[in-house]
């Protein structure tokens, strides 16, 4: 699995868009970018994933650069409940049942 | 509610004891996992169980053993508990073939005294 680099922490004002970056310069052609988040005292929650096209679902949007070396998770209208640690994971879609590797993630704090 | 559930939510025990944590998923998934999150918040895979095939993280002591009575359950047994086993343990599962889209349980906080 390719290594990812994320900022340790970020702040965002409530109601604004939260943009969380992730660098994955060693990503290979068959690896996808996955995002999870972990709200305090809860289990991790899958958010979204993508290969090279931008993706959007009810939770967030994922923008992947054309060279695929970095991506941005966008929470369009952040609320206080979006305060959490966000993890960017790069992995082949087949992956295999050997579990996910979580890094340190970005601690996103939504300010009222 | 469809979900991954774990019992107990909190477990406090003495060193040397043997304990079990239970996990159940009613999502119809056929792959289940156990993760450990230590005091520094690092989340690490311990085991995965898929169609009766067990994949073990080589760093996990053999005092830990998963047991799956059926596809919906993956329990974690821990023998001779040590202080360093104190952590939050998460169970997870995924839809068939979608190994990277996992659903996690709420966690079990284990404290060994």
Image (tube, rainbow, N blue to C red):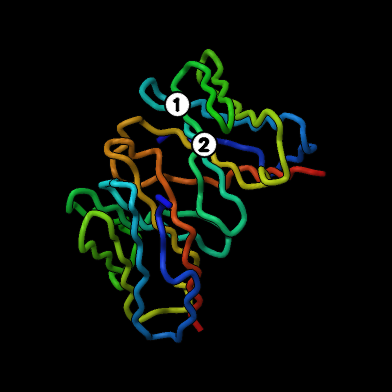
Q: Are labels 2 and 1 assigned to the same chain?
A: yes
Q: For the view shown, which residue lies furthest in the left direction?
A: B52
Where residue A14 sits, quadrant-wise, is top right
**Relative to residue B68, is residue A41 drawn left or right?**
right
Location of residue B81 in the rendering, given as x and y in whole percent from the top left corner:
39, 79
Q: What is the number of the mark on residue B20?
A: none
Residue closer to the observer: A103 or B90: B90
Chain to which mark 2 belongs: A
Q: Is residue A26 above or below residue B76?
A: above
The answer to whether the residue labelled 2 contacts the one labelled 1, judged by CB atoms less than 8 Å apart, is no
Would you name the residue on which mark 1 appears?
A: A27
Label 2 vs 1, first from the N-terminus = 1
**Relative to residue A16, is residue B3 drawn left or right?**
left
Query: How far apart are the two marked residues, 2 and 1, measured between alpha carbons?
Result: 20 Å
Mark 1 residue element: loop
Residue closer to the observer: A14 or A72: A14
Q: How many marks?
A: 2
Would you name the residue on which mark 2 appears?
A: A47
Location of residue B82 in the rendering, given as x and y in whole percent from the top left corner:
42, 79
Q: Residues within 10 Å of mark 1 (few under 14, many from 20)?
A: many
Which residue corresponds to the image point at 28% horizontal and 48% vertical from the top-left? B31
Where residue B56 sits, quadrant-wise, is bottom left
Mark 2 residue element: strand
Q: For the view shown, which residue lies furthest in the front direction?
A: B1
State which mark lies toward you, 2 or 1.
Answer: 2
Location of residue A106 in the rendering, given as x and y in whole percent from the top left corner:
63, 42
Q: Is residue A81 above or below residue B111?
A: above
């Amino acid at each position: 699995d390719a290594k990812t680099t994320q900022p340790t922490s970020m702040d965002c004002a409530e109601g604004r868009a939260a943009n969380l970056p992730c660098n994955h310069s060693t990503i290979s052609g068959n690896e996808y970018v996955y995002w999870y988040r972990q709200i305090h005292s809860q289990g991790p929650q899958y958010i979204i994933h993508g290969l090279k096209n931008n993706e959007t679902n009810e939770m967030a949007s994922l923008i992947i650069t054309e060279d695929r070396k970095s991506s941005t998770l966008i929470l369009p209208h952040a609320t206080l409940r979006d305060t959490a640690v966000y993890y960017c994971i790069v992995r082949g879609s087949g992956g295999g049942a050997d579990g996910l590797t979580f890094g340190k993630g970005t601690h996103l704090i939504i300010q009222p | 509610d469809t979900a991954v559930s774990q019992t107990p939510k909190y477990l406090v025990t003495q060193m040397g004891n043997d304990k079990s944590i239970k996990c159940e998923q009613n999502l119809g998934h056929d792959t289940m996992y156990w993760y450990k999150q230590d005091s520094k918040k690092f989340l690490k895979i311990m085991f995965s169980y898929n169609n009766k095939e067990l994949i073990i993280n080589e760093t996990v002591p053999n005092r830990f053993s998963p047991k799956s009575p059926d596809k919906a359950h993956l329990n974690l047994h821990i023998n001779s508990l040590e202080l360093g086993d104190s952590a939050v343990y998460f169970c997870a599962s995924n839809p068939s073939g979608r190994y990277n889209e996992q659903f996690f349980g709420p966690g079990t906080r284990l404290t060994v005294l």
